[in-house]
Amino acid sequence: MQQLRVIQRFVGIGMTALLMAACQRTPNRPSASSPTNCQTVEHVRGETEVCGQPENIVVLGSSMLESLLALDSQPVAYADYLASMKGEYDNPSQQIPYLGDRITGQLVNLGLVDQPEIETIVQVQPDLILGTEYNASQYETFSQIAPTLLLTWTDSKANLATIAQVLGKSEYAEALLAEWDQQITAARSNFAPVVASHPKVLILRSDNLQEIYFGNQLFGTCASLVRELGFELASLPGFDESNSEAPTIVSVETLSQFNDADLILMLGTGFDQADQIKGTDDFEDYQLSPLKQAWADSVIAQSLDASKAGKVYFIPYVSCAGLPGPIGTELYLEELKEQLLSNKP
């Protein structure tokens, strides 16, 4: 799967003294001479000691926000990968697609994931920072402010278990993971008739068909969950996904090589230049409208057997790739059910 496109930049700042001062006054961080309830946690950058019960948690990226909210915990500050949200989070339910209605407290906007506002992070005095591998170049800076855990974006079950361990909610996580597995098992049964009649699914990602991305291994939950439901994922002849570190860009003309696909899932990504999107519905419309129109206008796309049969479905990419955990899984399954099961052959 291609990870969500987050530019890795090192946040160079000349504020070491300020950072060290912040660390000294961060709540719930015991001094080295008197640690209490400390645990050592492994993550992608090694090991970090977390002491006490984290309360002021800074979250970098939607996958970390999803995991935290799924555990019924709240962040104090958040950095998104979307440029559409500027200013204060004064109405999270309308400003953070899919997850905002779960925010119950005041949330500080840290800007973008690849360049979060360091001074603002210092000001909120976190006792835990949760990020992903995309924040690796900033790890040393973050670590001067608070214990920092960088987890793999798509390894949602492991992330959930790790965060739950730190928060003292391991039993809660175990129940959540069991429910998650049961949900997928039930969905596999629901989709069995469609799998039997239309087994091969093509998954592509685009905003308006000018560039079409292919690469099942890099689409994360968007592809892996479809495979878990029992479908076979279509591929290009001779394409070795196991050796691909980035998705392959294909042209509209290449679509004819996928004509053996029974169903096509088009993942819409038309949100990069969105400006002040209000609410999840507007967000989804912005992602999908250009793609739907381009597909309708393309003679080649319309010539595919799946198009002729009305078996092309449009789904927001961020709803599955941006939310690879239990919340996103539920949303993605509901979307697939609404589109595929309501249009059974």
Image (cartoon, grey):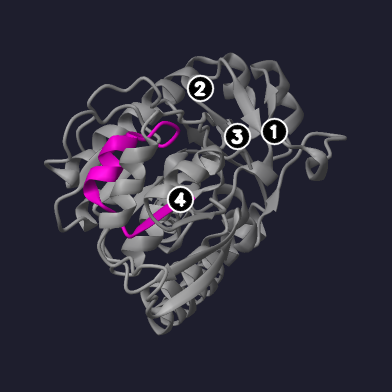
Which residue bears the numbered disc 4? 143
Looking at the picture, tell me which residue is in the foreground, 50 or 304: 50
Among numbered discs 3 and 2, the one appearing first in the sequence: 3
Examine the rendered structure and indicate whether residue 116 appears above or below residue 62: above
Examine the rendered structure and indicate whether residue 228 appears above or below residue 232: below
Q: Is 82 part of what is drawn in magenta?
A: no
Examine the rendered structure and indicate whether residue 194 appears above or below residue 2: below
Of badges 1 and 2, nearer the viewer stands: 1
Q: Do the residues labelled 4 and 1 touch (CB within 8 Å)?
A: no
Residue 147 visible somewhere in the drawing: yes
Give the extent of the magenta segment: 110-131
Of badges 3 and 1, nearer the viewer stands: 1
Q: Do the residues labelled 3 and 2 touch (CB within 8 Å)?
A: no
Looking at the picture, tell me which residue is in the foreground, 74 or 276: 74
Considering every residue shown, the one lying at the far right of the view is 238
How far, Cα to Cα, is label 3 from label 1?
Answer: 13 Å
Of badges 3 and 4, nearer the viewer stands: 4
- The image quadrant of residue 82 is top left
Residue 246 marker: 1
Residue type for callout 3? Leu
Of badges 4 and 2, nearer the viewer stands: 4
Residue 339 visible somewhere in the drawing: no
Q: Where is residue 243 in the image (x, y as percent from the top left)?
A: 82, 40
Residue 295 marker: 2
Residue type for callout 1? Ala
Residue 204 marker: 3
Looking at the picture, tell me which residue is in the foreground, 275 or 343: 275
- Image side of residue 167 versus residue 252, left or right: left
Among numbered discs 3 and 4, the one appearing first in the sequence: 4
- Image side of residue 1 versus residue 58, left or right: right
Mark 4, other Cα within 10 Å: few <14 / some 14–19 / many ≥20: some
How far, Cα to Cα, is label 3 from label 4?
Answer: 38 Å
